[in-house]
Amino acid sequence: MNKLATAVVCFFLLLVSFAGQGQIVKDSIRSRYFRQRDFAKYFVSDIYAPTPQIQGGMGWSQNEYNIATSRHAEYLPYNQTDFGAEMPIFTKVKYSDNKLVSKFSISIPIAARIWFDFTEPSTSPILNTDFQYAPLEFNYLKTTHRKLIHNIAIKLCPFFHESSHLGDEITLYRRMDTLPVTWVNVSHETSEIALTLNDANGKLTNNTAWKFGIKLLLNPRHGWYSVRNESGDSSVYIATKRLLETYVQVQNQANMGWLANDKFIRVMSVEVRERVQYGYPTYPSPAETNWKAFGDKERINLCMNAYLGWKFNFSNNLIPRFGAYLKGYYGINPYGQFRNLNGYRYLGISFVYEN
């Protein structure tokens, strides 16, 4: 009899346990530390996304970063390797009446990007390295539970540092050939705010999200870059007047429809960004004597970054992180010192691991 009573009690407790797992308290707040958020993630096409990434493809060749001048091809194979992470600090999720109300997170994004010419015959030089870091990034998502706009997310990054450095081989090459500007100190800080409509919010269903953002230069007097006397002719420096960079992004994901299912999540992501084209001179060759004639004023130009591919989903409990994409870019050369060159074109394959 005691065994039967014990079995009945255990069975009852088990039922209560299973029932409790499927319920959420009507009004509840869940706070977590050091756990990655599942909302307001960077779009794949975001040129500042702090995600590990390996790219290989064909890009525009120019004398300013082509050491092997014997190569006369208009396009050369390049590689870009990104190291990045969104270090999570704090996340809070709020529910009301068993429905999601809002999410909030604090994180630290950091990234380094290396661009190198792996087919150059003598050294396979690193052409440029970019560093990006923000001490704090805030993201907030508010659900609307409406048909057209499911949620609204806001991103705020009060202080974002970006700096860029030429590789040793390209710096030596520029000095040996007595180029008028051998090195430009590309270093600046910005503030950024962005608004997202219909964020995917950790779901793998068909969804299209839109993001609108602004980056504001924090130190107009210093500008986006500077030219030091020991690195070239500092008289070519043009004071910064363009303080804003704006962008629009759209990202569509699908687990149903054309070339998509639950295992292969199709992703199409496009960014159109107004970027500042730096104003120091360019020159067609080291032998050019009247190189100042090639100077250009600082200006705003449109740049487009586009990805098409798939995230691979082989776990029902986790958001897929690894993806393979066809990437295309057109606009200002995105690599630091070479951002005085417009019309840079690139087409290649990109493997991305999202945090």
Image (tube, grey):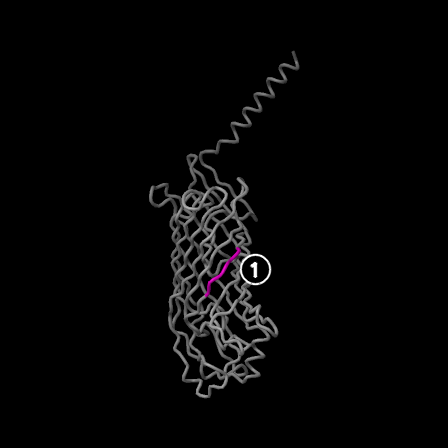
Q: Residues within 10 Å of mark 1 (few under 14, many from 20)?
A: some
Q: Is residue 348 magenta?
A: yes
The front one of 151 and 105 is 151
Q: State the image quarter where residue 284 is shown.
A: bottom left
Relative to 21, 208 lies left or right: left
Which percent across, then down, holds residue 121? 59, 73
Which percent across, then down, holds residue 355? 54, 52
Q: Which residue is mark 1?
A: 83
Label count reads 1
Look at 59% across and 17% down and name the residue there.
Answer: 8
In the picture shown, does residue 302 fall above or below 195? Answer: below
Look at 38% across and 66% down and name the residue there.
Answer: 302
Q: Which residues are magenta?
A: 346-351
Q: Residue furthest top?
A: 1
The front one of 122 and 38 is 122
Which percent across, then down, holds residue 112? 55, 63
Amino acid type at image mark 1: Phe
Q: Residue furthest bottom?
A: 289
Q: Is residue 219 magenta?
A: no
The front one of 350 and 299 is 350
In the picture shown, does residue 133 fall above or below 256? Answer: below
Majority secondary structure of the magenta segment?
Answer: strand
Q: Secondary structure at mark 1?
A: strand
Which percent across, then down, holds residue 130? 53, 67
Relative to 54, 298 lies left or right: left
For the N terminus, which image quadrant? Answer: top right
In the picture shown, does residue 210 fall above or below 93? Answer: below
